[in-house]
Image (cartoon, coloured by chain):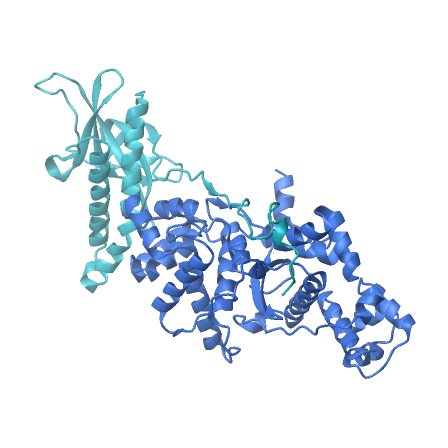
Chain colours: A cyan, B blue
């Protein structure tokens, strides 16, 4: 079990929130773009690809804002590194996931989908993590991180995930608006006695 | 019996939401006689006046007193058919009773204190939405609001503009408020909150309703009753545009949006709601009006609102408001609280229940014949 510091957890939540925000703000443009030509909706790949591009944009934006310095890795993957408890380096790679009926997550992969190793220069152990997200009705749904503990070989294969840490893509709204009941009314305050007994309209 | 007595009987009967038959049953006077009394066709003996007065919750002297004969405009209601005529008539009559009583007591109207010439009235082109926006800013200024200020209390703001704001809890179809002029006094009636979950009115809707009705009063003072649904929809759109600009003026809210990062998302709208007391869904419309988002973006936000079930209950609670003019004006003359209301009622010659109804903004209790399923479910855990 890997534990994240409060600071890292907060940064991860910020990335998740930014992904959600970008998706919620601009997700509709996927449909707008696909309507430009009927060929775009033939295979369904265009939609998936455009949605991924938005997720990547949110991931990069949020990662930068959180000071995690995200980058494009080999094979078109996007990831960032962050120190996790135990003086080890986690390498968090953005991957789309699917949530199954039992609540677990499935991330498809092949044997080449492995990352994290021992950094040759620093000899720090890099632990692979998936920065996973699901899509719900065209928008980023659940966002989570999980250590990648292995790969199930197959076609397609899938990542074996350690314990899931759900991130708060949408922070709960706790505030409220309280009307100002102390606002005054001319002529009706306690010190307005001099003007109250004038004639009615 | 004078013509004015006839008018008082009819007005109080309507205000009490009674049919002629119901008044006849409660007073023991024949229903045909009630009809003739109200039309002034017959004189009635003193004993009948006493019985009718009892049924109408007033003293005979109230019915016998000459009336100034209040004159009221009819409210402009969207899809008029969905608001029961009897409910509209009851509110119109109740307004007449309230304003007549206020004048009889010599209650000081805020408009007189401020030496108002009356509400600012729109004389521009109702087809020009920019003109309506600019006029809303003028009305804000008249109410003493700085350009960037949040409307802290919409009812108090309307009262400062000289409106009389009174509560309603009768069924008005989809309408949460109604406005009209009664003896040239601008009267806004707004639903008060309720303990019945389905009938409760969130604070943001209450605020929008007040601003919307204010919009009708200042924009449609010389507009004829809509003759068809399209015309009715147009006057509603105009009042909505006024209400949006009045509660959320363009420039300051655009600055707020920019300070929040400029993204029009539900998260941002929730934060803006917290500051402006304006519904998230209404903000979608507002930003579309201001040209910040397009139709596609607005549709996307509506879908997200729907997916989160925010159509029924939005996050970020906005508190309910209450109007204070009548209670305070009576308090000045007769003392505050129930004793003051009773003294005022005795002076006018009507039951204090009338004054309690006009000043009570506490959440309405569930009628005895209503079962609140949500409450039952909650009590069962």
Q: Nearer the viewer, residue B329 or A31?
A: B329
* Residue A181 higher or lower than B126, as above or below: above
Quadrant hosting residue B141: bottom left
How many labels sit on residues?
0
Task: Give the residue displayed 80% in from the left and 73% down from the top.
Answer: B21
* Residue B171 higher or lower than B260, as above or below: below
Instruction: Find the residue positioned furthest to the left.
Output: A121
Task: Give the residue displayed 31% in from the left and 52% down from the top.
Answer: B254
* Residue A29 higher or lower than A123, as above or below: below
Left or right of residue B59: residue B192: left
Q: Position of residue B308 (x, y in %)?
A: 42, 48
Quadrant hosting residue A118: top left
Left or right of residue A161: residue A177: right
Task: Give the residue displayed 17% in from the left and 25% down from the top.
Answer: A116
Left or right of residue B68: residue B177: left
Q: Position of residue B157 (x, y in %)?
A: 51, 55
Q: Position of residue B199 (x, y in %)?
A: 60, 54
Instruction: Find the residue positioned furthest to the bottom.
Output: B41
Q: Which quarter shows the C terminus of chain B?
A: top right
């Amino acid at each position: 079990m890997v534990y994240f510091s409060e600071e890292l957890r907060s940064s991860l939540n910020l990335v998740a929130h930014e992904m959600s925000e970008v998706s919620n703000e601009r997700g509709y443009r996927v449909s707008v773009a696909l309507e430009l030509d009927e060929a775009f909706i033939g295979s369904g790949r265009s939609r998936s690809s455009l949605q991924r591009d938005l997720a990547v944009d949110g991931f990069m934006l949020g990662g930068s804002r959180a000071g995690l310095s995200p980058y494009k890795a080999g094979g078109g993957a996007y990831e960032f590194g962050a120190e996790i408890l135990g003086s080890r380096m986690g390498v968090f790679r953005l991957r789309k996931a699917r949530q199954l009926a039992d609540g677990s997550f499935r991330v498809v992969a092949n044997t080449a989908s492995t990352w994290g190793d021992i950094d040759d220069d620093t000899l720090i152990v890099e632990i692979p993590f998936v920065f996973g997200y699901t899509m719900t009705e065209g928008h980023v749904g659940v966002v989570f991180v999980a250590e990648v503990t292995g790969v199930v070989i197959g076609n397609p294969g899938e990542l074996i995930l350690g314990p899931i840490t759900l991130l708060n893509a949408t922070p709960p709204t706790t505030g409220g608006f309280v009307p100002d009941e102390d606002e005054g009314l001319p002529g009706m305050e306690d010190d307005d006695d001099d003007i109250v007994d004038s004639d009615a309209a | 019996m004078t013509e004015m007595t006839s008018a008082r009987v009819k007005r109080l009967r309507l205000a009490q939401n009674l049919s002629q038959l119901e008044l006849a049953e409660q007073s023991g006077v024949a229903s045909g006689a009630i009809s003739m009394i109200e039309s002034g066709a017959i004189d009635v003996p003193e004993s009948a006046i006493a019985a009718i007065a009892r049924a109408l919750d007033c003293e005979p002297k109230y019915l016998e007193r000459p009336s100034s004969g209040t004159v009221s405009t009819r409210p402009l209601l969207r899809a008029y058919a969905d608001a029961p005529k009897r409910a509209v008539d009851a509110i119109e009559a109740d307004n007449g009773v309230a304003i007549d009583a206020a004048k009889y007591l010599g209650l000081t109207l805020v408009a007189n204190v401020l030496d108002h010439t009356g509400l600012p009235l729109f004389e521009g082109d109702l087809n020009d939405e920019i003109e309506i926006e600019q006029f809303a800013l003028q009305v804000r200024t008249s109410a003493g609001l700085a350009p960037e200020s949040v409307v802290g209390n919409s009812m108090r703001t309307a009262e400062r503009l000289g409106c009389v704001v009174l509560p309603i809890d009768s069924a008005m179809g989809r309408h949460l408020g109604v406005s009209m002029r009664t003896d040239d006094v601008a009267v806004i009636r707004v639903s008060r909150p309720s303990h019945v979950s389905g009938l409760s009115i969130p604070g943001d809707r209450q605020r929008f309703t007040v601003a919307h009705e204010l919009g009708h009063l200042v924009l449609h003072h010389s507009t004829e009753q809509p003759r068809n649904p399209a015309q009715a929809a147009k006057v509603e759109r105009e009042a909505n545009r006024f209400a949006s600009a009045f509660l959320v003026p363009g420039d300051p809210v655009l600055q707020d949006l920019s300070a929040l990062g400029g993204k029009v998302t539900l998260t941002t709208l929730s934060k803006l709601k917290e500051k402006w007391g304006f519904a998230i869904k209404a903000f979608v419309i507002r930003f579309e009006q201001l040209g910040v988002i397009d139709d596609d973006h607005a549709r996307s936000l509506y879908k997200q609102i729907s997916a989160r079930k925010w159509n029924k209950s939005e996050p970020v609670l906005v508190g309910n408001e209450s109007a204070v003019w009548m209670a305070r004006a009576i308090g000045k003359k007769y003392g505050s609280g129930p004793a003051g209301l009773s003294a005022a009622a005795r002076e006018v010659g009507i039951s204090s229940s009338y004054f309690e109804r006009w000043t009570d903004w506490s959440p309405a209790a569930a009628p005895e014949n209503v079962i609140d399923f949500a409450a039952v479910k909650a009590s069962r855990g």
